[in-house]
Image (tube, rainbow, N blue to C red):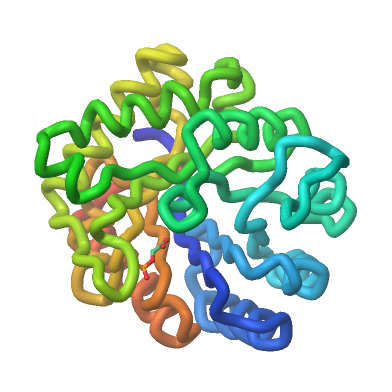
């Protein structure tokens, strides 16, 4: 895998107010200052935090993302957020298809496709989240599920756009949140390989190999080092464990030392 930096991000869901988000971002940046040339960091706070978080992100060299994006610039879409609104605030990244959006709010693969299309057209780095449910895993259709989510989600994205804008987070639904259990590293790596193959099928070797793949779902201090050294995992996407900035920074340091110990090249 070519490249230089390891990716670490967190989605703070509906857990922090704007003030709390800003303090969190500053603290994470401060505590990772020593390794900032080795990592690429992003934080995805609530919509109401974005206007304060974006300038702080710029100040500390950390990307700020939005937890969703609508698929039209304007219109009768109560509760949605427009690409123009995000652009106006200077947001650089959007997350689409998080498991909670798909499973609590019933967003479909086709809707995610529309969001992805809109995000790419507006020049946002686009983090598409995918993952199978426990039921799909039990039926042995994890790979099929991931392939479907990718093929529909990225249907309108061409290879140039894919290379420029798309990142993928693999987050098995059964691994996320308080009742989740992290995927073991071998299984996570296998699923990342399926994702990589699907991207190569869609975009060819060169572009398919360049799209960063992150693992998310109950990442913690103990499993982060094992996950990050897997050959198909380019970064970690952390929820609960990253809500505390000190814990998150510690996790990042531990993961990087694991890579150093294995003498592995940094990914993107
Ligand atoms: P978790 O959340 O780390 O709390 O399981 C991960 C996510 O939802 O991205």
- Nearer-the-camera pick, 160 or 103: 103
- Nearer-the-camera pick, 75 or 42: 75
Residue 40 visible from this viewpoint? yes
- Count of picture labels: 0
Residue at horizontal 57%, vertical 29%?
Answer: 113
In the image, residue 163 lies at what x, y percent?
56, 27
Q: Is residue 108 above or below residue 182?
A: above
In the image, residue 197 lies at what x, y percent?
29, 22
In the image, residue 150 lies at what x, y percent?
42, 28
Locate the N terminus and report the quarter of the image it occupies: top left
- Nearer-the-camera pick, 137 or 265: 137
State left or right for residue 193 relative to residue 120: left
Residue at horizontal 71%, vertical 32%?
Answer: 118
Q: Is residue 252 above or below residue 42?
A: below
Q: Is residue 23 above or below residue 255?
A: below
State left or right for residue 190 relative to residue 22: left
State left or right for residue 38 relative to residue 133: right
State left or right for residue 6 relative to residue 28: left
Residue 6 visible from this viewpoint? no
In the image, residue 83 lies at what x, y percent?
79, 44
Tell me the quarter of the picture where residue 259 sits. bottom left
Q: Ligand 1 falls in which quarter?
A: bottom left
Tell me the quarter of the picture where residue 160 sits. top right
Residue at horizontal 43%, vertical 76%?
Answer: 242
Residue at horizontal 71%, vertical 66%?
Answer: 47
């Amino acid at each position: 895998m070519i490249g230089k930096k390891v990716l670490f991000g967190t989605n703070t869901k509906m857990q922090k107010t704007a003030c709390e988000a800003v303090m969190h971002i500053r603290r994470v940046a401060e505590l990772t200052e020593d390794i900032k040339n080795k990592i690429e960091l992003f934080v995805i706070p609530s919509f109401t935090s974005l206007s304060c978080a974006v300038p702080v992100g710029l100040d500390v060299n950390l990307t700020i993302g939005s937890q969703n994006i609508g698929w039209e610039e304007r219109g009768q879409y109560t509760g949605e957020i427009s690409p123009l609104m995000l652009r106006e605030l200077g947001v650089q990244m959007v997350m689409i298809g998080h498991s909670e959006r798909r499973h609590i709010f019933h967003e479909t693969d086709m809707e995610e496709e529309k969001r992805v299309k809109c995000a790419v057209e507006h020049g946002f780095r686009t983090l598409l989240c995918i993952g199978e449910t426990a039921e799909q895993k039990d039926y042995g259709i994890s790979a099929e599920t991931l392939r479907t989510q990718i093929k529909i989600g990225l249907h309108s994205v061409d290879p140039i756009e894919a290379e420029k804008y798309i990142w993928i987070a693999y987050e098995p639904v059964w691994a996320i949140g308080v009742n989740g259990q992290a995927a073991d590293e071998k299984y996570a790596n296998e699923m990342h390989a399926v994702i990589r193959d699907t991207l190569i099928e869609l975009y060819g070797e060169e572009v398919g190999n360049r799209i960063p793949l992150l693992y998310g779902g109950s990442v913690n201090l103990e499993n982060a080092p094992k996950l990050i050294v897997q050959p198909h995992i380019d970064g970690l996407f952390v929820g609960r464990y990253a809500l505390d900035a000190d814990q998150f920074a510690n996790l990042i340091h531990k993961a990087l030392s694991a890579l150093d110990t294995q003498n592995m090249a940094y990914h993107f």
